Amino acid sequence: MQRNNKQKIRFQGSNRIYEGNISIRIDRFQLDKKKIKKEIVEHLPSVGIIPIIDDQNIILVIQYRHATGKTILEIPAGKIENDETPVQAAFREMAEEIGYTGNLAPLSHWYLAPGYSTEMMQVFIATNLKKLKTRGKLDEDENITIKRMKLNTAVKKCIKGEIEDCKTVAALLTYAWYQDSI
C-alpha cells in the first residue's frame, strides 16, 4: 500500500459480510484523525487481452453485461482462477471467448475500481494468432459475438465514448500510444 507521508493510516479491523464468487467486507480504518468505514469488494485478479490480427486489425467481443443492462464492446477478459498463472488465464480466456491462441506479451496492469474493489487486471497483447478447431466453453453468463475491428476505429470509439468499458478503453489507448511511440 502506497502512503502519502503526511497521512497517517491505521487499520482497525475488517468484517466479511458476504462470501461467494466475490466477497464483500467492511473495513474500518483511521485516516489522519477521521474514522472511516468502507465497503470493499474482494475479487480475484483478472486478465485482459488485445488480440492483434495484423498491423491494423484487432478482435473485440460483444457481450451482454447485466449490471449495465447493455450489450458492451470490449477486449476478451476474465478472472484468473485459483490454480492459474496470469498467462494461463489469458490463453484460456482467448480460447473460450474468441477461439484463438497465439503469442502473449505483457502490456500493463491496473486496478479496475480501486475505490471499492481489490481486482487487479493484467493486460496482454496477443500476436501470431492461430484459430482453434473449436472454441472453448463459455461461462454460464456469457453470450459472446466476435467483432473484428481496425485499431484506429476502436480508438476513435474509445475517445467518442462509444466503447464504455474502462478496461477496454485503458488497454486500447495504452496499446495505441505504445504503437505510436515505437
Image (spheres, rainbow, N blue to C red):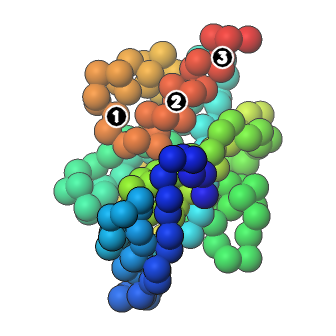
Q: Secondary structure at mark 2?
A: helix
Instruction: Examine the rendering and report whether any part of residue 145 can be seen.
Output: yes
Mark 3 vs mark 2, CA separation in Å: 10 Å
Q: For residue 28, which quarter of the picture? A: bottom left
Q: Residues within 10 Å of mark 2 (few under 14, many from 20)?
A: many
Label 2 vs 1, first from the N-terminus: 1
Q: Are marks 2 and 1 in contact (CB under 8 Å)?
A: yes
Mark 2 vs mark 1, CA separation in Å: 10 Å
Instruction: Examine the rendering and report whether any part of residue 57 can be seen.
Output: no
Task: Name the residue tied to disc 2.
Answer: 172
The N terminus: image quadrant = bottom right
Q: For residue 109, which quarter of the picture? A: top right
Task: Name the residue tied to disc 3.
Answer: 179
Q: Is residue 140 above or below residue 122?
A: below
Q: Which label belongs to residue 163?
A: 1
Type of amino acid at the residue the image marks with label 3: Gln
* Total marks in image: 3
Type of amino acid at the residue the image marks with label 1: Ile
Q: In percent of the image, x 26 and y 61: which residue is there?
A: 67
Q: Residue furthest left?
A: 69
Q: Is residue 118 above or below residue 181?
A: below
Label 3 vs 1, first from the N-terminus: 1
Q: Secondary structure at mark 3?
A: helix
Q: Are marks 3 and 2 in contact (CB under 8 Å)?
A: no
